[in-house]
């Protein structure tokens, strides 16, 4: 244990040194003050470091006042943004028509919400929120403090108490259905570039040409990376002014991998969200889409790759975990779980040691 801690520290040190050499020191925290006042007031964002991965950046910190999200009736969720002086930020520059955009999504990329809380005079933001299901959620605040020339996206984990049943990220698909609408995604996510994405909205086979403005455009797109929920910078195409059926965005994709895209669009006075999974890659290096998820959402403990069942280990941690998972399965599945399961479960809650 002691050795692994040492090694971990050593690895972190390497990352820090290597990162500094590449000029991405921001990755590991706030920039250190420089004697003599030579440091710029607002260092340029580090190239290649996506937003949303840090709770604190450039002296700004996201501080939730609420310790968890409600899963029953909506409950007030409150937080503040502290500035470099340690005081709550009370003045913002609006982006996409709002002073602050709050994105809430479960760690498995499900349960996406995009809301706009209210700012109190003391710098406390609040809004009634309800998580659709228990689990660990990532809460992103996307904002631009007044006087700063660029925006920030800070992220913090907030739990919704209860038994977490993760769901697999859907396989990549170019068409999403929501509420009678079909949205088609065109364009490739290419790492290291600003990738053009065109989303086309139809309803009952007919193009929708009377989309309503929403957040300063005819749609708002959020993109998150599967694995760490990195929050991509996306902006609408200023040149496209048609109210549908096509909406164009540019997304800055930091790496290959799988991304989840959430398009908010407004029609008939209702905002709806179309969700897509897209793989980013180039040529042969393109990320292979994951195998399609099994048709059931029941989490299970067994997979074909699992080692042979070991003798029961009494009341150990693993047994307790299995019992908890078992509680969610029908009795028949509990009894014959291994026989019923024939497909891999990407999110199996099996923590038994690997052979
Ligand atoms: Cu917003």
Image: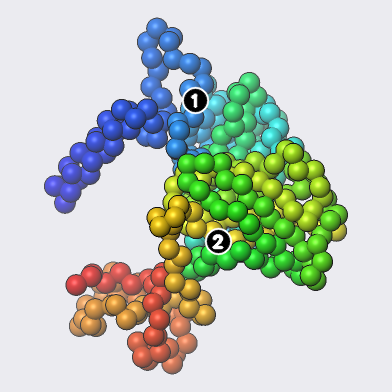
Quarter-wise, where is residue 239 in the image?
Answer: top right
Please report the residue visible at 45 percent of the width from the left and 52 percent of the height from the top. Answer: 282
Quarter-wise, where is residue 178 in the image?
Answer: bottom right
Residue 65: x %, y % from top left: 56, 42
Dot 2 lies on which element?
Answer: strand
Residue receiving disc 2 = 277
Please report the residue visible at 55 percent of the width from the left and 61 percent of the height from the top. Answer: 277
* Residue 338 appearing in the image: yes
Residue receiving disc 1 = 44
* Residue 269 appearing in the image: no
Does residue 207 lie above or below 138 as drawn?
A: below
Q: Which of 72 and 345 is in front in this view?
A: 345
Please report the residue visible at 27 percent of the width from the left and 72 percent of the height from the top. Answer: 352
Instruction: Tell me the crowding category of disc 1: few under 14, some 14 to 19, or many 20 or more residues within 10 angstroms, Cα based.
Output: few
Does residue 265 lie above or below 117 as drawn?
A: below
- Could you tell whether 293 is left or right of 89 in the image? left
Please report the residue visible at 66 percent of the width from the left and 46 percent of the height from the top. Answer: 249
């Amino acid at each position: 244990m002691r050795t692994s801690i040492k090694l971990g520290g050593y690895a972190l040190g390497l990352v820090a040194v290597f990162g500094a050499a590449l000029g991405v020191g921001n990755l590991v925290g706030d920039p250190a003050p420089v004697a003599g006042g030579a440091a710029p007031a607002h260092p340029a964002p580090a190239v290649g470091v996506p937003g949303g991965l840090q709770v604190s950046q450039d002296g700004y910190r996201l501080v939730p006042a609420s310790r968890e999200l409600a899963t029953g009736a909506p409950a007030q969720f409150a937080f503040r943004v502290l500035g470099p002086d340690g005081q709550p930020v009370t003045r913002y520059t609006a982006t996409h028509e709002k002073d602050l955009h709050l994105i809430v999504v479960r760690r498995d990329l499900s349960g996406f919400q995009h809301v706009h809380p209210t700012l109190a005079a003391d710098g406390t933001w609040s809004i009634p929120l309800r998580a659709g299901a228990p689990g660990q959620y990532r809460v992103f605040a996307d904002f631009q403090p007044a006087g700063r020339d660029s925006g920030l996206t800070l992220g913090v984990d907030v739990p919704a108490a209860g038994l977490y049943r993760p769901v697999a990220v859907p396989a990549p698909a170019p068409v999403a259905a929501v509420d009678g609408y079909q949205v088609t995604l065109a364009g490739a996510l290419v790492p290291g570039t600003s990738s053009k994405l065109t989303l086309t909205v139809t309803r009952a086979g007919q193009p929708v040409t009377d989309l309503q403005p929403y957040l300063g455009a005819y749609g708002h797109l959020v993109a998150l990376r599967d694995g760490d929920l990195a929050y991509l910078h996306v902006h609408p195409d200023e040149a496209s002014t048609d109210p549908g059926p096509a909406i164009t965005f540019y997304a800055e994709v930091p790496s290959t991998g799988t991304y989840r895209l959430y398009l908010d669009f407004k029609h008939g006075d209702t905002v709806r969200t179309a969700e897509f999974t897209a793989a980013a890659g180039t040529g042969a290096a393109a990320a292979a889409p994951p195998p399609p998820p099994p048709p059931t959402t029941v989490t299970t403990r067994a997979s074909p790759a699992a080692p042979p069942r070991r003798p029961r280990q009494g009341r150990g941690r693993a047994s307790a975990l299995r019992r908890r998972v078992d509680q969610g399965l029908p009795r028949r599945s509990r009894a014959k779980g291994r026989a019923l399961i024939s497909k891999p479960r990407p999110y199996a809650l099996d923590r038994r040691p690997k052979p």
